[in-house]
Image: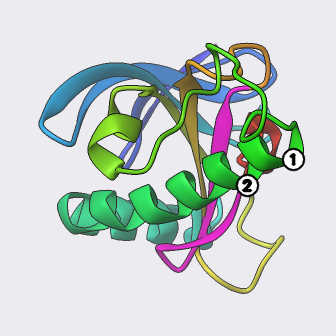
């Protein structure tokens, strides 16, 4: 089933509404999946529209705010698995955001149901070199990083 939503554009339904789109992140262009949680009827919450529109309006400024929390998460994960003591090629020492940027690629944006949190809720999905199976996810509430973890925190 396909709909043409006035905010999200043309979407297809396959247990979730989605479309492929192109977006820039840190001066690189990525083909990503835009996923909008919703029922088969194609009706979305006003909160979902507000969350997506706020994200897109502030996208250029927000990108930089993702990087420090991702770096902190990476360094914490690296420590938890012991690769700060023992060498592992998948978890190299990363001390700068520039090096971190080389290790992640944008994979998707998830617009969650509007009634889960009181804030505008968006998930950002990344692929990462250190954990190809679980990836990396950000949960944004009111356009601020609320949680960093595996991709499931964004879904």
Provide the residue span drawn in magenta. 135-148
Q: How is the image coloured?
A: rainbow
Label 2: element kind: helix
> Relative to 66, is 102 on the left or the right?
left
- Residue at position x 59%, y 60% from top? 72
Quadrant of residue 22 in the image?
A: top left
Task: Find the residue positioned furthest to the front.
Answer: 85
Which residue is at the front of the view, 39 or 116? 116
Main secondary-structure element of the magenta-colored stretch? strand
Indicate the position of residue 63 as horizontal and vertical percent values.
31, 57
Quadrant of residue 55 in the image?
A: bottom left
- In the rendered structure, are the residues bearing label 2 and label 1 in contact, judged by CB atoms less than 8 Å apart? yes
149 in magenta? no
Against 79, residue 81 (above or below) is above
Residue 155 visible (yes or no): no
- The residue singled out by tag 1 in the image is 80
Against 80, residue 47 (above or below) is below
- The residue singled out by tag 2 in the image is 76
Against 115, residue 1 (above or below) is above
Location of the N terminus by quadrant is: top right
Against 69, residue 40 (above or below) is above
Badge 2: residue crowd in 10 Å (few <14, some 14–19, many ≥20): few
Badge 1: residue crowd in 10 Å (few <14, some 14–19, many ≥20): few
Indicate the position of residue 27 as horizontal and vertical percent values.
12, 37
Label 1: element kind: helix
Q: CA distance from mark 2 to mark 1?
A: 6 Å
Which residue is at the front of the view, 155 or 135? 135
């Amino acid at each position: 089933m396909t709909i043409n939503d006035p905010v999200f554009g043309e979407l297809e339904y396959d247990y979730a509404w989605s479309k492929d789109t192109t977006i820039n992140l840190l001066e690189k262009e990525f083909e990503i999946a835009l996923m909008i949680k919703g029922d088969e009827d194609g009706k979305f919450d006003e909160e979902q529209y507000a969350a997506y529109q706020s994200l897109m309006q502030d996208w250029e400024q927000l990108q930089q705010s993702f990087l420090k929390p991702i770096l902190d998460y990476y360094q914490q994960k690296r420590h938890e698995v012991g690769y700060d003591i023992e060498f592992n090629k998948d978890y190299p020492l990363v001390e700068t955001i520039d090096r971190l940027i080389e290790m992640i690629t944008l994979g998707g944006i998830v617009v969650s149901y509007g009634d889960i949190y009181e804030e505008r809720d968006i998930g950002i999905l990344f692929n990462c070199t250190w954990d190809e199976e679980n990836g990396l996810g950000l949960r944004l509430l009111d356009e601020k990083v609320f949680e960093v973890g595996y991709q499931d925190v964004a879904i």
